Amino acid sequence: MFVYVTGGRILNPTYDDWLMIGDSAQHYIGWEFFRHTPLFQWPIADNPKLGLEVASSIVFTDSIPIAAFIFKPLNYFLPATFQYFGLWIWMCFVLQAFFAWKLLSKFVSDRLSLVLVSSFLVVSPVLIYRFIHQGYGHIALGSQFLLLAALCLYFDQTKNTGRWAALIVSTILIHAYFIPMILAIWFAWLLKSSASRASRLRHLLVIGFSVITTFVLGGYIALGPDLFLGSSSVTPDDFPYRFRWQPLALIDSGTDFSGGWSRFLMDRTELFGDVEGFSFLGSGVIALICILFVAIVAHAISGRDFGSWKHSTLTTVLSLAMFLTGYGLLTQDQFSVLMFLVVATTIVFLAYCSLTGTNWIGIGKHKALLFAVSVLALYSMTNRPGVGRYTFFEYPLIPLVKQFTQTFRTHGRSIWPAYYLLVVVVLIAIFRVFGKRVASLIFLVALAFQIVDSVPAISISRERFSPDTSWTSPLSDPRWAMFATSHKNLLTIPPLNNDVEGRWIAFTHFAANNNLGTNAGYFSRIDPSDLEQPTEKIHQGFMTGRLDPESFYVVTNDEYWAGVLSLGYRYSFVGEIDGFHVVVP
C-alpha cells in the first residue's frame, strides 16, 4: 500500500525535494538544524540556531522527535542530505497494519476475514490524506497507529502498565495532538480496570513519572508559558471556525488539495479550515454500514439473526438495491444526505449497543470508552457546532478551557478516535452478524470497491510524492557560501516567519547546511511580541550603522531597503545577490 500511495521514491533518504514546501519544509529543516547540535546538550531537544532569540526545541517543528533522537547519534555516518520522513511514512503503514491486525484479531477469528478487515484501516482516507494535507502533508500526524495501539491495550484484559507507559511516552515524542486522544483511551481503560487500589496507584505513579520525564527531556518546556497560551496568527476569536469537525465530513468525499475519494458521494463545500476535520469513511466502509443498517432493520422486524447464506444474501441484495436505487433516482447531493442518515442511524444503534452491552453484534458494554471518544468528538466540533456550512449556536468558554483550546486549537483532529472506533465496530459487527463465509465475501467486495473508487485521490497522492521537478535553492551565487564561512548568523529584516512567498525555506535550508543561526523560519507556537525586541535591535543597528559583525543580513522589504540605502553607511558589501537585498558588515 505504501508503494501504491507514494510511489516508493521517498524511501531514498537523500531525496528531499518533496519536503521543500509548506509544513513539510518546517519538519525537515527542524531536523536539519537539530542534527548539528551537540550530542550531549541540555536540554537534549534544544534547537537554538533555528530562531535564535525565539528558538525552542525539535518538538515544535513537528520533526518527529523520537526519530530525530534515534538518528542524531548517527549523524557522523549520515550523508549531508538525509531525511527520515519517507521511512516514517512507510513505518506508519506497516504499524497501521500491525495494530489493526492485533486489535481486530481479538474479535475476528477467521484469518482471511482478518486480512481483509485490517486492510480497511490501512487504506483509510483519514490516514492517507494526512500525508498530503494542504498539498504538503503533516507527516507526524500520519502516526495514527497510535490510536489503534491504544485500542489494543484498552481491549486487553491484563494490567499492561509497561505497555501503556511505552505508548504514552512514544506519543509524546511523536506529536502532541495525539496526547489527549491516547490519554482519553487510557483513562477509559483505567475506569474499567478491576485492579486493586494499590495496583492502580503504582500504575498511576509509573505513568505520571513517564509523562513528566518525557515532557522535560522531549523539550516541551522550551516555550515556557507560550506552550499553554497558544500564541499564533490564529486568534482565539477565529480559530473555532477554521479547524472544526462537522458530521457531514463522514460522507464528504473531498477537501482542499484532495478530492476524488469517491465517484458516488459528493465533495461538499465546507467552511474555511474544516479541512482539518476531514474524516471520510471511504465508500467501502459506507457500503458496509448500509449492509449493517439493513441487517439491523431486518433484525428489528423479524427478530432473526443473519448467519445463514439465505438470510445473509437477502440482506446484502437489499442493501445493494437500496444503494443503486438511491444513486439512480436521487441527485448526488440527495444521495449523499441519504447515506449520511443511514450512517448516523447506524452510529446511534451501535452506541446504544455499547451502552447496554447488547450481544447481538458481540461488541460488549464499554461506557467509559464511548464517553471518552464522545467527549473528543464534541471537542472536535468546537464551541460553534454545526452541520456542513451551517452553525447551530455558539457558547462561551471558561478561561481554563479556553487556554486548553488555544493549545490544541486544531479541534477537527480530535474526531479520529471516534472515527477509528466506528470503523472497527462496523467491521466486527459485519463479521459477527453474517459469519465468516459470507462476511469474508462482503469484505472482499467492499474493499475492492473502496480501492477502485478512490483511484483519483490516490493519483493525487502519488503526484505529491513524485514531483516532476526538483527543488532548487534560489541562493546559487558563490558569495553566499563565502559569507557563511566568515559569519555565524544569517539575519532577515523584517524577520521571515512562514512568509507567503516561501523565502524562509531557502534561507533556513542554507543556514542549516552551513551551521548558521537564523531568525528566519516557521514559528507557529510563539508570541508575535517575542520577535519585537530582537527585530528592534537589528533595526537600531541599521539606524546607527553598527551592525553585528558576526552576522550578515538580508532585507526582505523593498521600502526598508530603500531606507537602508538612503542612510549611506559603509559596509563590506551592500547590494543584490540572486534578487535578494544583502548587507554584510
Image (cartoon, rainbow, N blue to C red):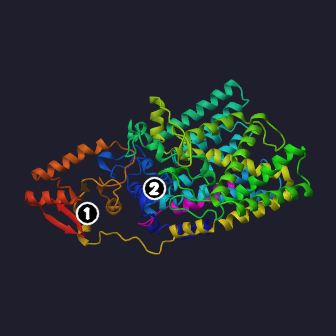
Between 204 and 393, the residue placed more toward the observer is 393
Disc 1 is placed on an element classified as helix
Camera-side residue of 250 and 301: 301
Q: Which residue is mark 1?
A: 484
Numbered disc 2: secondary structure: helix
User: Which image quarter: residue 460?
Assistant: bottom right
Residue range corresponding to the magenta coloring: 78-98
Please determine whether, in this image, residue 82 is positioned above or below residue 228: below
Q: Position of residue 568 (x, y in %)?
A: 7, 59
Residue 71 magenta-highlighted? no
Name the front one of labels 2 and 1: 1
Q: Indicate the amino acid at tag 1.
A: Ala
Say left or right for 430 vs 582. Answer: right
- Look at the magenta stretch and give its main secondary structure: helix
- Residue 568's disc number: none
Packing grade of label 2 (10 A; few <14, some 14-19, many >=20) is some
The answer to whether residue 164 is left or right of residue 212 is right
Q: Which residue is mark 2?
A: 72
Instruction: Say whether residue 240 is visible.
Output: yes
